[in-house]
Amino acid sequence: MEAASSSTCTRGSSGAFTLHSIGDSVKRKSPSQSMFRDGAGSLALVAGIVAVVCAFVPFVGDFVTIPAGLVAVISGWIGLGRAVEGDASNGREAVIGAALGGIGLFIVFLTFAASSM
């Protein structure tokens, strides 16, 4: 009876039963999980959008845009590197996020330069 508690039986398409160890199913990844590391590219896109939107908000926008823009540029660079190596599938998101972060930083720089004249 102990062998039955640590094993499972399944019925194949031919009608024969197959004995599987429970440890075999634990080690396998489910097919729904992605093998790619897309976190940096997605973070770059979200942070870039936040940076550009907050760049147009007076006073508080500078305190949000500068960190968000830096995060977008850095994580976009990391995400693009992962996409080039084949570890990630969202290189386009990484580049767009880095570009939006750079645009947000540029807008804050222009606003600061224009207001200090």
Image (cartoon, rainbow, N blue to C red):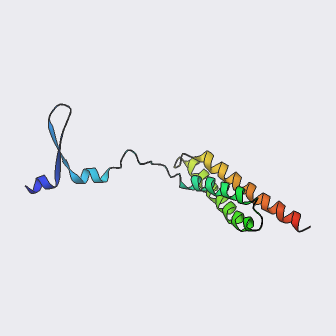
Say above or below: 31 vs 14.
Answer: below
> Which residue is at the front of the view, 91 or 114?
114
> Residue at the spot x=53%, y=51% of the render?
38
- Residue 91 placement, left or right of 63: left
Residue furthest to the top in view is 14
> Residue at the spot x=32%, y=50% of the render?
28
**Quadrant assignment, res 64:** bottom right
- Residue 4 placement, left or right of 56: left
> Which residue is at the front of the view, 76 or 87?
76
Residue furthest to the left in view is 1
> Residue at the spot x=65%, y=49% of the render?
95
Quadrant position of the C terminus in the picture:
bottom right
> Which residue is at the front of the view, 52 or 102?
52
> Residue at the spot x=71%, y=60% of the render?
54
Q: Position of residue 5 (x, y in %)?
A: 14, 55
Q: Position of residue 109 (x, y in %)?
A: 81, 62
> Which residue is at the front of the view, 77 or 107?
107
- Residue 35 placement, left or right of 116: left
Residue furthest to the front in view is 58
- Residue 58 placement, left or right of 77: right
Q: Position of residue 88 (x, y in %)?
A: 53, 49
Quadrant position of the N terminus in the picture:
bottom left
Q: How many marks?
A: 0
